[in-house]
Amino acid sequence: MATPIVRAAGEGERYWFFGGGVHEWLVTDQQSDGALFVFLDDMEKGKTTPYHLHPDETECVYVLSGEILVNIDGHERVVGEGGFTMTPPGTPHAFIVTSDRARLLALHTPGAGAAFYLGASEPATPELEAAAPVDFERVTASAARTGGMQVLGPPPFAR
């Protein structure tokens, strides 16, 4: 059964995501009875995702601050503060942070992909955040184990 949630800023669970960046989980799949998964994503310049897809989830991203370059199904576009993306299930996509910092609000529906993110994350600590480790092998292993994401290849952006 879904649980009502009201959170003040900073009250979500904080995780270091080994794809790079700190997530603040606002609503989990368990709290929403599987309907959705919502988190904030705070990242630094150059953070990128592999080219990937979510087989069963729609992914929506709202850019709260900063700027990203997104590639959705081979089409690239810069998305800045106040911009929005919606990626349907099964659609290949990736992004890279092009500003010094970016903060995104991400929503996945249904929320089954939360297991993928949990498997590719650790509770955030100051030490872990300072080290800023990126481990795409862990991300890929969690994707294979949970089915919440399929890695298609490296980031499609020229470095």
Image (cartoon, rainbow, N blue to C red):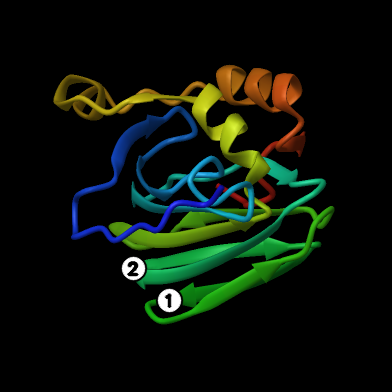
Q: Going by the image, does 69 lie left or right of 98? A: right
Q: Is residue 50 above or below residue 122?
A: below
**Residue denoted by label 2:** 66
Residue 142 pos. (x, y %) = 64, 22
Q: Residue at x 54, y 22 (%)?
A: 119
Residue 12 pos. (x, y %) = 28, 46
State the SS at label 1.
strand
Marker disc for residue 105:
none
Give whichever of discs 1 and 2 has the lower sequence position.
2
Q: Nearer the viewer, residue 60 or 112?
A: 112
Please count the marks in the image: 2
Q: Residue at x 69, y 49 (%)?
A: 156
Residue 144 pos. (x, y %) = 75, 22
Question: Does the residue at mark 1 contact the one at mark 2 (Cβ under 8 Å)?
Answer: yes
Q: Nearer the viewer, residue 147 or 133?
A: 147
- Measured in 3D between alpha carbons, the distance from the residue under mark 1 to the one under mark 2, in whole angstroms, is 6 Å
Q: Give the amino acid at mark 1.
A: Gly
**Residue denoted by label 1:** 80
Rendering quarter of residue 85: bottom right
State the SS at label 2.
loop
Rendering quarter of residue 146: top right
Inspect this view and state whether residue 44 appears.
Answer: no
Q: Give the amino acid at mark 2.
A: Gly
Residue 108 pos. (x, y %) = 61, 55
Inspect this view and state whether residue 123 appears.
Answer: yes
Q: Is residue 53 above or below residue 58?
A: above
Q: Residue at x 74, y 47 (%)?
A: 54
